[in-house]
Image (tube, rainbow, N blue to C red):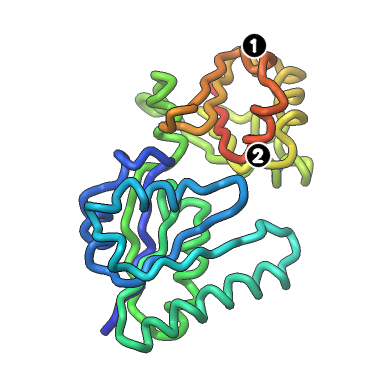
Amino acid sequence: MPVFYAVSTGPGNPEFVTLQALRVLRSCEIIFYPQSEKNTIALDTLKFLESEIELSEKTLVPCTFSMTSDKEKSDSEYEKIASQCIQFLCDGKDVAMLSIGDVSLYSTALRTARLIKKAVFEVKFISGVNSFSAAACSASLSLCEKDEMLAIIPADSFFKDGKLEEALTKEGTKVLMKMGRYLKEIIHLLEELNLIQNATLVQKASLNDEKIFHGKEIFSMTEADFNNAYLSVIIIK
């Protein structure tokens, strides 16, 4: 029976692709990958691995997700992509869908896999390095020690709903992700709560143009940096 693989590729640097992911990509004839005007990380990873996975023999299918808050539109986009995957699976072909970071965390491939599983096809997740672990290592930070807690917060959503301040006041390390819209406002909130000195912002973790801002260095960010807000992670110790 053909299998749908949700394949983690890590935060961006192709060297983070695991041996297991490489094996699966070699074996799958069909590879779906996420793409947008601002984000070509998945395609760049495939090109880097071209000789390793015999890319010329693969069918590559780009898929665009608008990240809209309109549930009806979002559901329609995912159903369209899942339907394309299912057509290949019905032809007896294994399908891989790339997921930046780790597929178990805020992943478009995860949501697609859920729809495919409902169609009674086998689904397998291939794990990888998530962005906040890569960010912490780039900044030489410990996320947790001994009995410390770790909270992963979808910051834009929490900020919009007025829940972010309360989340930030709880104990443990906080990781802020998914900040495509309100990064400036979130930084201002951290300043108001006297947390900025405990914060490290890492942008494009693991990539050649990675940037790291410790504490008040965050105030030196340029408009170009804010344009890459969605590829930012803030770690607050």
The residue drawn where x is 61% and y is 45% is: 38
Place of residue 96 in the rendered image (x, y in percent of width and height, measured from the top left): 36, 66
Residue 71 drawn above or below residue 134? below
Whether residue 172 is visible here, answered yes or no, is no
Q: Give the side of residue 26 with respect to residue 64, left or right.
A: left
Which quadrant of the structure image shows residue 99? bottom left
Whether residue 57 is visible here, answered yes or no, is yes
Q: Give the side of residue 217 with respect to residue 144, left or right.
A: right
As helix, strand or loop, the secondary structure at mark 1 comes to: helix
Badges 2 and 1: C-beta atoms under 8 Å apart? no
Residue 58 drawn above or below residue 137? below
For marks 2 and 1, the one nearer the N-term is 2
As helix, strand or loop, the secondary structure at mark 2 comes to: loop
Q: Which residue extends farthest bottom?
A: 90
Residue labelled with disc 1: 216
From the image, which quarter does the N terminus lie in? bottom left
Q: Give the side of residue 117 with respect to residue 64, left or right.
A: left
Question: Label for residue 180?
Answer: none
**Looking at the picture, which amino acid does disc 1 mark?**
Lys
Residue labelled with disc 2: 179
Place of residue 210 in the rendered image (x, y in percent of width and height, measured from the top left): 48, 27
User: Distance of mark 2 from mark 1, alpha carbons?
Assistant: 19 Å
Q: Give the side of residue 122 with respect to residue 119, left or right.
A: left
Place of residue 168 in the rendered image (x, y in percent of width and height, measured from the top left): 65, 30
The residue drawn where x is 64% and y is 11% is: 216
Dot 1 alpha-carbon crowd within 10 angstroms: few under 14, some 14 to 19, many 20 or more: few
The residue drawn where x is 43% and y is 65% is: 32
Q: What is the count of numbered marks?
A: 2
Q: Which residue extends farthest front?
A: 56
